[in-house]
Each structure stands twice: as structure tokens, then as C-alpha cells.
Amino acid sequence: MSGTLYVVPTPIGNLEDITLRALRILKECDLIACEDTRQSLKLLSYFKISKPLISFYSYNEKSRLKGLVDKLLNGKKIALISDAGTPGISDPGYSLIKESINKNIDIEVLPGASAVITALVGSGLPTDGFIFCGFLKRKPSKMKKELVELANLEKTIIFYESPYRVLKTMERILEVFGKDSQICLARELTKKFEEFMRGTVEEVLESIKNRKSLLGEFVVLVYPAKMEQI
Ligand code: SAM
């Protein structure tokens, strides 16, 4: 009989945001597939969990996939975690989940922390329809093309962005979405310096330009200017 793949979200900052079920699965499984073993060791030692770890991330995903699937087929219980948040959401995991489905291996996905949902709910932007794009393309022309396509959708557009690029990206959003579109920058969610910067694109851009530095992790949420009419 085959084993089970457990997809286990971990906190995106505040360690209290791990569920009781996640802790139980991490204690009961045979093996934990994680992104960076050093990062996961910190989390696991905080919760006094000791388990064999195997790293599974973009650079070794292909070579590790078969070994993990074989273990699952041989009855092992494997918990898949990433450095923070939900595996598979702009993090490794998709290939293992897909291959497990192809091989009829049981999968249990635990609900839990993810920056995208936390940011959306706190943004004050419409939650009834939203598009999550992960990280936008880096090349300016490709990013602009992507933004132009998104700007036609009357939905909340959400993406992840690095603090080093957020200012430039905001300038491109201004160009494409216009100064009156609504935006929210959700920064350092669940952490000490958590902040939601809400307003029009023009207002939020002005406020971040006036800052000495822009540190931390960001989620960017934008809604086209027509929002006033809904
Ligand atoms: N799997 C994760 C999840 O479920 O949210 C996302 C991992 S992705 C590699 C990392 C990106 O997520 C960061 O660059 C940032 O855009 C966003 N992120 C993660 N934690 C965050 C936090 N505490 N506050 C704001 N954004 C966060």
C-alpha cells in the first residue's frame, strides 16, 4: 500500500501561525521534504520536532523527485514543507504533488499560512474575485506586457515582489493602471513591523518614495480605477 504525501504550510513570520494538525503531521511522518534544511531545522527545533530532512527545491527538484515518489509508493509518510507559507505557492512542491496524483498516491493538503490570502483579506480590496500571479516577469518589457493584460480584468491583482524592486514595479503599475487605481502594499505580514499601505497608486507611490529604505517582504495588490463604480 502506498504512503501519503502531506502538504504542510508553515508560518510566514509569526511562529504561532502553525496549526495543531501541522505539528502532529510533522511529528508523525517518516520524512520531511523541505526547501532549505537550515531554515526548516530552526522551525522544527523551536517545536522540538526531530525528523529526517531531505532538501527539495528548484535546483535539485528533478533529481530528487523520483526518490521521493518511490518512498511514497513504498508506504512512507512524507510531509512537504517550504521555507515559509504554503508549499507550491511560489515555492517548490508542484512537481511532487503532480507526480503523486499521477501515481495515485494519497495526498492530504493542510490549510494554513500563505502571504497571498493574508494580504488580500487585509488589503480592503475586493475579495470576491482575485488573480494571484506569483512573481511577475523581471524583464521590464515582459512585466509591462503582463501588467497590461492584467489591467483589463476587473479583479484584485495580487503578486509577490522583492523589496529591491517594489519601487520600480510601482512606477510601472502607475504607467499601466493609472494614478487613481487602488493599491495596497502588504509588508512584513504577521511580523513585528507588519504594515498595510493602502490608497491610490499615486498616494502610495509618493509615500514610499519618501522613505529612507524599503525593507522586508512585500505583497502587492492592485485594483483597476473603475473600483468606485462597484
Ligand atoms: N509559499 C509562500 C506563501 O505561501 O506565501 C510564498 C513564498 S515566496 C518564495 C516568498 C514571497 O512571498 C516574498 O517575496 C513575499 O513577496 C511573499 N511573502 C512571504 N512572506 C511574507 C510576509 N510575511 N509578508 C509579506 N509578504 C510575504
Image (tube, helix red, strand yellow):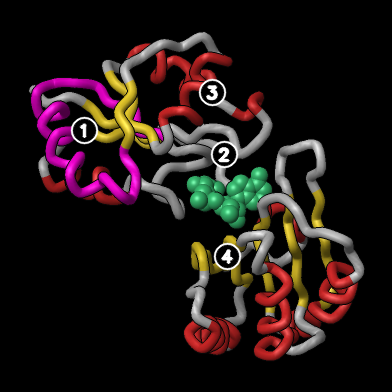
Q: Tell me the mark number nearer the camera, choosing from 1 and 2.
A: 2
Q: Cβ–Cβ below 8 Å for labels 1 and 3?
A: no
Question: Earlier along the polypeptide chain: callout 3 or callout 4?
Answer: 3
Question: Earlier along the polypeptide chain: callout 2 or callout 3?
Answer: 3
| Image location of residue 28, percent across then percent down | 35, 12
Q: What residue is shown with label 3?
A: 43
Mark 2, other Cα within 10 Å: few <14 / some 14–19 / many ≥20: many
Q: Cβ–Cβ below 8 Å for labels 4 and 1?
A: no
Q: Tell me the mark number nearer the camera, choosing from 4 and 2.
A: 4
Q: Could you tell me which residue is drawn at 43 percent across and 35 percent down?
A: 36
Q: What residue is shown with label 2?
A: 113
| Image location of residue 24, percent across then percent down | 44, 15
| Image location of residue 229, percent across then percent down | 77, 84
Q: Could you tell me which residue is drawn at 60 percent across and 71 percent down?
A: 157
Q: Is mark 2 within 8 Å of ligand 1?
A: yes
Mark 3, other Cα within 10 Å: few <14 / some 14–19 / many ≥20: some
| Image location of residue 48, percent across then percent down | 51, 9
Q: Could you tell me which residue is drawn at 65 percent across and 68 percent down?
A: 165
Mark 4, other Cα within 10 Å: few <14 / some 14–19 / many ≥20: some
Helix, strand or loop status at disc 3:
helix
